[in-house]
Amino acid sequence: MRSVVTLLEIIDECFNGVFEGELPSHTEISNWAKKIGLSTYLDSGQEISGQEYCGIIDESISVGSQKLLVTLAAPARPSGQPLRHEDVEVLGLEVAPSWDGDAVEQAVASCTGKAGHAPEYIVSDNGVNLAKGIRQTGITHHRDISHSIGLILEDAYKGQPDFEEFTSKLGAIRLKYHLTDNAYLLPPKQRTIARFLNLFDWVEWAGDMLKAYTSLAPEQQGAFAFMKGHTPLIEELTAVMECVRHIEQRCKRDGISAETAKLCAWAAGKLITGKDCNSRTIAIGAKIGTYLLGEAKKIEGKGEARHISSDIIESTFGWWKTRKPTNKLCGVTASVLNIATVGKLSTREGRIAFDFKGRMETVRLVDIKEWIDLNLLDNWAAKRKNELKKVS
């Protein structure tokens, strides 16, 4: 918010005092944002009252000792493109030290109350607590395609000697050459968390490096010579990732249906019957096909398509994580209310239609404090500061 004030000061200077010395402080701007966020969040659910919708739910990684559970509402039927922020509405923002199945069930019930009726189905990752909570509600649960395929890939490659050796060498070469003239050729960094959900970049890099190897300078060929010995693995991974990319793009665009599941299962079948198939690719292809047909069976007889991806909620968490306090002791603060306005303000049309003044006038600072007291946990940073003051 201090950066916003600085920007306004620059504009005021460039345009000869257009604000006439009435610049808001960073605290005022923060309060405005919280007011708008709380007003939008309290009214969420009204737009989908009487309409079919799906729920998308996920919990954040730990922020200090806290976890944020977010529930989004989206149109029940795919529109021919992946979900965007302007397509969804924030139904639930809840904080707890942890989320078990019973707590997830209660959170879904709370969101159902706001919307006035239950969602047609819910999409989430494969977390045991989320799956249990959704199952207890009796609402159909669709497992996110990226997480599900990521688990299949993890089962196929984790602990495999050739895969572990290759990825270990990639990590070592990054350390060895990251400060040299050859750093621009190094592979993308492998993620520690959810690494099997994010194989695309470095597998693509490996395939490109093999193709370009003969055109590299002798010194560069020496640095990456180890890759030649892993050619079969790289070619295998490239074929698998091309298949996965095709399936995910189609399902995220068109949703899951009987037709989509059959077409994508057929595409996965190429990993089973291809000329270079092996026991790993056969297992991967079979499990992907089983997953897709199993998800389609949940809507059997209804002749409809449903969302099968929770990417939009991952994007929402990504937006929040870049803006939340860097000090983890702060936990989840009232700034989390700004999540409610992401979709509303993500397009020019949305910003023009948004009643900023009206939203701020419907909420008082005391309302924000009351919401914090009812919904957020202790701020450890403030508690630490107060305790240390006592000592001094």
Image: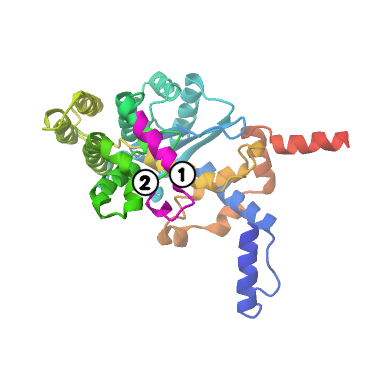
Residue 154 falls inside the magenta stretch: no
> In the rendering, at what x and y percent does residue 40 appear?
52, 47
Please tell me how many numbered marks the rendered image carries: 2
Q: Residues within 10 Å of mark 1 (few under 14, many from 20)?
A: few
Instruction: Give the quarter of the image for residue 199.
Output: top left
Q: Which of the labelled discs sits on residue 176, or is there none?
A: 1
> In the displayed structure, would residue 93 be above or below residue 22?
above
Percent x, y for residue 47? 41, 45
Q: The residue tagged with tag 2: helix, strand or loop?
A: helix
Tag 2: amino acid: Ala
Question: From this viewpoint, is residue 382 visible?
Answer: yes
Amino acid type shown at disc 1: Lys
User: Which mark sits nearer the N-terminus, 1 or 2?
Assistant: 1
- Residue drawn where x is 46% and y is 62% of the image: 352
Location of the C terminus by quadrant is top right
Q: Quick one: quadrant of the N terminus?
A: bottom right
CB atoms at circles 1 and 2 under 8 Å apart? yes
Q: Is residue 325 above or below residue 112?
A: below
Bounds of the magenta segment:
164-187
Q: Mark 2 — residue?
A: 223
Q: Residue at x 59, y 27 (%)?
A: 97
Query: What is the crowding at mark 2: few (fewer than 14 residues within 10 Å), some, or many (at least 20)?
Result: some
Left or right for 302, reference 315: left
Determine if residue 120 is in view.
no
